[in-house]
Every structure is written in C-alpha cells, then in structure tokens.
Image: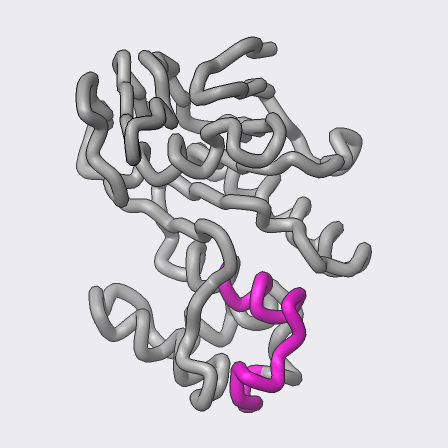
Amino acid sequence: MLKADKITKVLKGNEVLSNISYTFENGKIYLLTGHNGCGKTMLLRALCGLITPDSGEIICDKKCNFGVVIETPKFMENETGYFNLCYLASIRNTINKDTIKENIKLFDLDNEKNKKVKTYSLGMKQRLGLCQAVMEDPDIILLDEPFNAIDEENLNRIYESLNGFREKNKIIIIASHGIVDRNKLMIDETIVMDKGKILKEN
C-alpha cells in the first residue's frame, strides 16, 4: 500500500499539488490523466520522494522499492544500452547480468543492446527506460508518459508486461494525457487531475 495523505506542494508561488489524498493498493494499475501541467508528474515525484511535500506525508506500509520513469529517460549517450543498464544495476547490486539480459529481451532491445544510446530513436530510449525501471523487480512502478513514440507492436508488449506486474501484486501508477487502450491494459482506477487537484476517480 502507498498513500498520499493531504499533500501540498508550492513551487515558485504556484500550488502544484493541493491537499491530495489517495491510497494506492497492491495488485492494481492506476491511470493518472489530465492536461499537461495538471500535476500528474509532480504527484509521481512526490510519491517516490524526488520532491518533498510542504505539508502532508507519503506513507508506505513497508520499505518501498520504486521503479521510476519520469519524463524522458536520461542515459550515458556514448555508452551502449547494455552498459548503461549494467552500470545502474551495479549501484544496488541486487541482480545479475542474466536478469538484465532477460529484461532487455522483454522490451525487444536485444538487437540494439550493444549499440550506443546516442543512436537510439526516442521510442528505443523509452523502452530502455522502462527496462531500467523494472529490471530490479520493484514493488511500486511509476511511469510518466511511458507510451510516447512507441510503435504498436512494442506498445502491446509493454501492456502485456504491465499486466504481468499487476498479477505479481505490484502497484503500477501511469501518468498519461494520451489515449490508452483499456482493452489491452488492465486499468483498475482512473484518476483525473486538474490544477494540482484530483477532480475525479473511477
């Protein structure tokens, strides 16, 4: 369980999050939606600790292990995709190279893993970011506009992977202002945001 309890955040005089309370439960996919600037990304940042709320708190029922993609993934452009993933994995040292390779195949990057990231398309960088986010088997997955520049074949592959993480009792929170195929992605709850507030949930 992950909970936002009355969180508010002000940046440069603007209230980007306004008294938000919501409980995210295990084994569910949540879709955060709303126009650009409505607070989706800020909420993700607050949930994983990248920003600290001015009031309220973020509560997790255990030590939270996050996998996060927020905005455009950043990598060492002059290194290969595989090198980048191995380097990031070495920080916590919880997975081996076989696990990294399995995740590379999961996101259809096997043929590109030994190419420098600067040669990757935007869609390939998105998939590399998704691979990095999930390869260490996090309990909570936060994704900001993860479907941008993804072709239909790989989009279906990503939907299938996210549905699989849902079945593994993980919390998946996706921020997107675009169209998501609800026939393929098993969204449990949709949260509509505007001006830093939750307007609607269903």
Question: Where does the image place residue 59, in percent across and percent down from the top left?
Answer: 22, 23
Looking at the image, residue 183 sits to the left or right of residue 44; the answer is right
Quarter of the image where the C terminus is located? top right
Residue at image point 59% right, 50% down = 146
Residue at image point 61% right, 37% down = 176
Q: Is residue 125 magenta?
A: yes
| Along the viewing direction, whichever of 97 and 120 lies nearer the viewer | 120
| Along the viewing direction, whichever of 61 and 151 lies nearer the viewer | 151
Q: Is residue 103 magenta?
A: no
Counting every numbered tag in the picture gives 0
Please determine whether, in this image, residue 167 is positioned above or below residue 15: below
- Which segment is the magenta one? 113-129
| Along the viewing direction, whichever of 29 and 19 lies nearer the viewer | 19
Question: Where does the image place residue 115, in percent across and percent down from the top left?
Answer: 57, 89
Q: Main secondary structure of the magenta part?
A: helix
Question: Where does the image place residue 141, in percent across and percent down from the top left?
Answer: 43, 43
Residue at the far front in the pictured view: 13
Residue at image point 48% right, 32% down = 40
> Does the image show residue 189?
no
Quarter of the image where the N terminus is located? top left
Color scheme of the displayed model: one colour
Q: Quadrant of residue 54?
A: top left
Residue at image point 66% right, 30% down = 186
> Does the image show residue 56?
yes
Please determine whether, in this image, residue 16 is positioned above or below residue 133: above
Looking at the image, residue 202 sits to the left or right of residue 180; the answer is left
Q: Quadrant of residue 133?
A: bottom left
Looking at the image, residue 40 sits to the left or right of residue 15; the answer is right
Question: Where does the image place residue 192, in percent across and percent down from the top left?
Answer: 58, 18
